[in-house]
């Protein structure tokens, strides 16, 4: 019999004494039990989207049938029973918010989003509020009018859209109209110029004139996506191998990858019909003519990086990657060979801001996507930054200046890209400080993505970067987009939070919106809602597809209204509350001290539980801890937010804090939950059938998770933990030699190669099971690989990363879960016994 392991070494230093050190961890609510119970419930059950039923958790794989309400994969709300009055909402302390992921991936077993052809007139819309026709509007006056479910206005039906009604006041063509049956639809508005994107206002920093002879504010015809790939060719990028790895990745994405025998290992991933341009930069800008009618690319050097311009028109810069295959391949070969000819003693310089300005100029009147590969601090050209002086590590803990751009040019550039319909994504591989607070503002404002590879190693990080770029160009993406959220009478949209630029308070505008991005919307109640009617929310996203179609994706949700506190709590969605709290915390980092944000998070958690106690369980003894079923593990997830890298009360490099801050601002609900509380598996306990393809269905069933604490681990075990970006395989000192042989190919823990980037392919059941689990996780992320580390107990530095992901332990400069639950309980008890408001309770966390 093996005993449980002592707590592994972690980054928190000496342990603090808790509030109730004798609490039994097995007796407190478990996040894993909640996840596993919900997964078991929906394993063989289909979710029907009509209002009135409990919704699967975001961490559950389920199949939804759209019955007029959008799937929870597209939109989730903090409670599926909206409070009827603002007073009730305030008393319950549950924020009225929704998190919307318009292009979320669907299960293969689900129907795709229907496409409705609208022609020149466009879709039917309310004359008053602009809302789109949907399953929850009603038809009156014999079908000549329809009543909007959002504002109750009666709109006359155009002649081309008219249909008579049957005895139930349903249109006779109901079965032929997906927009009247489905909660999520796409309207094709490519033929209607009213829906085309407008060119941005004249920007004095852009020298290019519109290729269209019409006015600068004229609309732009939808066309296939244009990509600009921006490569860092500074000596730092070359010497680290980052440039060579970038060229390998680009070649695989553009032209596919083939093995020595000629068989295809990876297909071409760039969508057909899209055009590309290549830009490189160091202390100068380099643009390339890649026309297919030449044997070698023509390079044009722009030495004046303070005032960059395009020496070639966009029509020459952009080429079809297939037609120009040979020229592009020649250029990538030349860039790969730079390392051999690089002179010694060269100082690394970077004019990233100028390269992005030039790319924006090339896309200013069409929109598109800039994909940049960055390795060097941007000390030259537009938005030039000065490296910060060495400062005290403790100063970086709580100083807001580390979370705002140090030059406003980066904000201006991000807003200019958003207004022009240009998204910017960045692959970062810094060897030292890069100032992500500044340069990361650009993708954050224009809807791009950020990928961070600290201490880049080509063999380890190259395949990961390829999987990330492949996901970036293949996932559902819209560009030149604007969105609008509308709500029914009595509900008002207060604030939208996400990775976009707010051209006005209620209309986000940005360059790109993809399947992995989500944003939150907070509402306030301005009038009493009737419990006899549904409250409605509608989100409309106007965008251009990568293949050049102009569409409007409309997402509809009808919600029940409750006038009892118990019903609001009964249908609450903790995942949304947690994800919204994360977003709110990330947006407050530039304006509030981290210590204040952490205290507010604990207070918000206590306030929700206190409100339930006061409104739904007032007759119980004040000293008894009462938690609503929907929020059973809210303290565990709140503690996980406090331990996350952006808010951690311990020294974290500012670049790391800002990277995770920008990522969490746009993350999906599911991605947020899995990142906050990483999935932990005891792989040594797998039975003989789990994680292997079923003999009849071929489905690979995943094993159950375990709680994230060393209390539940044994020294003879092998464990896998995954937070969506990092996977760590922890090997106990007493692990069985046979298990080691089956998984690593060696039977001695000292012979395990901790430098491997993937598990060896062995013909053993154990090896197949663990590799299937990792492959399934990769599939769930859309094909993105996660970095893999091996941590042997008490031997490897990777054990610190592993220990910091055990969220129920005392680590990350915060309390263990039992102690934190005691803190929350004490705050509630103090407020109940004193009769004071929770905000005035004196019990605070010791950080």
Image (tube, grey):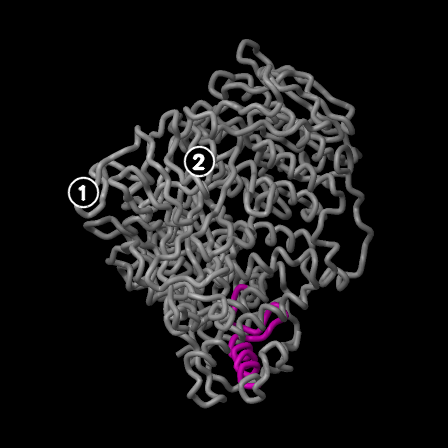
Residue 155 is situated, as x and y percent measured from the top left of the image, at 37, 40
Q: Quadrant of residue 632?
A: bottom left
Mark 2 or 1, nearer chain start: 1
Mark 1 Cα-neighbour bin, 10 Å: few <14, some 14–19, many ≥20: few
Residue situated in front as seen by the camera: 557 or 40 = 557
Element carrying mark 1: loop
Residue 281 is situated, as x and y percent measured from the top left of the image, at 69, 29
Tag in front: 2 or 1:
1
Q: Which image quadrant: the C terminus?
A: bottom right
Inspect this view and state whether residue 82 appears. yes
Residue 221 is situated, as x and y percent measured from the top left of the image, at 49, 22
472 up-or-down from 454: above or below? above
Q: Which numbered dot is residue 753?
A: none
Residue situated in front as seen by the camera: 55 or 203 = 203
Q: Which numbered dot is residue 166?
A: 1
Q: List the residue tagged with mark 2.
A: 474
What span is in magenta? 805-830
Give the residue at x 37% y 46%.
148
Q: Measure the C-alpha gap from mark 2 to mark 1.
A: 44 Å
- Is residue 566 part of the magenta span, yes or no? no
Inspect this view and state whether residue 33 appears. no
Residue 829 is situated, as x and y percent measured from the top left of the image, at 54, 85
Judge from the rendering whether residue 272 lies leftward or rightward of residue 237; answer left or right.
left
């Amino acid at each position: 019999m093996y005993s449980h392991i002592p707590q592994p070494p972690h980054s928190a230093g000496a342990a603090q004494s808790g509030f109730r050190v004798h609490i039994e961890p097995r007796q407190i609510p478990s996040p894993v039990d909640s996840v596993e119970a919900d997964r078991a419930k929906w394993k063989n059950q289909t979710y029907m989207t009509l209002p009135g039923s409990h919704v699967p958790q975001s961490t559950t794989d389920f199949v939804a049938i759209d019955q007029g309400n959008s799937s929870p994969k597209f939109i989730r709300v903090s409670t599926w029973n909206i409070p009827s009055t603002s007073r009730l909402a305030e008393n319950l302390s549950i924020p009225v918010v929704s998190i919307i992921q318009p292009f979320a991936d669907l299960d293969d077993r689900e129907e795709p989003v229907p496409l409705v052809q609208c022609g020149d007139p466009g879709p039917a819309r309310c004359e008053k509020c602009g809302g789109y026709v949907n399953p929850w509007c009603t038809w009156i006056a014999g079908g000549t009018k329809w009543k909007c479910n959002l504002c109750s206005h009666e709109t006359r039906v155009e002649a081309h859209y008219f249909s008579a009604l049957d005895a139930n006041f349903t249109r006779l063509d109901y079965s032929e109209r997906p927009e009247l049956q489905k909660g999520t639809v796409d309207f094709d508005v490519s033929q209607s110029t009213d829906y085309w994107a407008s060119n941005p206002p004249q920007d004095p920093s852009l020298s290019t004139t519109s290729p269209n002879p019409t006015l600068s504010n004229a609309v732009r015809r939808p066309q296939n996506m244009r990509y600009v790939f921006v490569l860092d060719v500074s000596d730092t990028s070359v010497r680290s191998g980052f440039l060579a790895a970038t060229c390998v990745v680009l070649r695989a994405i553009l032209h596919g990858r083939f093995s020595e025998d000629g068989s295809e290992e990876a297909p071409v991933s760039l969508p057909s019909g899209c055009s590309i341009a290549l830009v490189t930069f160091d202390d100068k800008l380099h643009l390339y003519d890649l026309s297919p009618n030449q044997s070698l690319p023509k390079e044009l050097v722009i030495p004046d990086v303070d005032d960059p311009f395009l020496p070639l028109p966009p029509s020459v810069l952009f080429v079809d990657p297939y037609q120009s295959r040979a020229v592009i391949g020649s250029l990538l070969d030349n860039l790969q060979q730079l390392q051999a000819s690089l002179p010694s003693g060269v100082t690394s310089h970077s004019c990233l801001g100028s390269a992005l300005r030039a790319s924006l100029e090339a896309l200013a009147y069409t929109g598109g996507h800039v994909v940049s590969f960055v390795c060097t601090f941007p000390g030259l050209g537009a938005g030039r930054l000065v490296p910060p002086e060495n400062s005290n590590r403790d100063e970086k803990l709580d100083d807001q200046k580390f979370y705002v751009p140090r030059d406003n040019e980066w904000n201006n550039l991000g807003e200019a890209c958003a207004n022009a319909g240009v998204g910017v994504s960045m692959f970062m591989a810094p060897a030292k400080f890069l100032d992500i607070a500044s340069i990361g503002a650009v993708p954050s404002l224009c809807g791009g993505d950020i990928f961070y590879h600290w201490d880049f190693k080509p063999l380890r990080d190259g395949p990961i970067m390829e999987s990330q770029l492949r996901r970036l160009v293949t996932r559902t993406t819209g560009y030149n987009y604007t969105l609008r959220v509308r709500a029914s009478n009595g509900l008002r949209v207060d604030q939208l939070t996400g990775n976009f630029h707010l051209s006005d308070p209620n209309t986000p505008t940005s360059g790109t919106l993809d399947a992995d991005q989500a944003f939150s919307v907070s509402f306030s109640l301005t009038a009493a809602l009737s419990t006899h009617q549904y409250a409605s929310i509608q989100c409309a996203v106007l965008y251009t597809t990568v293949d050049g179609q102009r569409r409007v994706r409309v997402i509809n949700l009808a919600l029940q209204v409750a006038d009892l506190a118990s019903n609001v709590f009964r249908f609450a969605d903790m995942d949304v509350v947690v994800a919204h709290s994360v977003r709110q915390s990330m947006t407050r980092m530039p304006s509030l001290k981290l210590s204040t944000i952490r205290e507010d998070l604990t207070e918000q958690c206590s306030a929700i539980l206190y409100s339930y106690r006061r409104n739904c369980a007032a007759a119980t003894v004040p000293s008894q801890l009462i938690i609503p079923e929907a929020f059973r593990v809210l303290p565990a997830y709140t503690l996980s937010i406090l331990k996350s890298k952006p808010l951690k009360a311990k020294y974290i490099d500012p670049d790391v804090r800002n990277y995770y801050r920008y990522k969490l601002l746009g993350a999906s609900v599911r991605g947020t939950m899995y990142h906050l509380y990483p999935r932990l598996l005891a792989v040594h306990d797998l039975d003989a059938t789990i994680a292997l393809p079923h003999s009849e269905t071929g489905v690979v069933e995943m094993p159950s998770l375990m709680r994230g604490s060393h209390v539940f681990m044994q020294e003879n075990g092998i464990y896998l933990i995954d937070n969506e970006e990092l996977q760590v395989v922890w090997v106990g000192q007493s692990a069985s030699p046979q298990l080691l042989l089956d998984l690593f190919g060696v039977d001695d823990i000292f012979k395990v190669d901790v430098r491997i980037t993937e598990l060896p392919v062995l013909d053993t059941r154990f090896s197949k099971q663990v590799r299937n689990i990792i492959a399934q996780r990769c599939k769930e992320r859309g094909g993105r690989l996660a970095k893999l580390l091996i941590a042997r107990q008490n031997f490897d530095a990777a054990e610190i990363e592993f220990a910091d992901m055990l969220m129920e332990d005392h680590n990350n400069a915060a309390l263990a879960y039992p102690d934190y639950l005691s803190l929350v309980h004490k705050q509630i008890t103090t407020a109940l016994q004193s009769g004071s408001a929770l905000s005035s309770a004196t019990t605070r966390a010791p950080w």
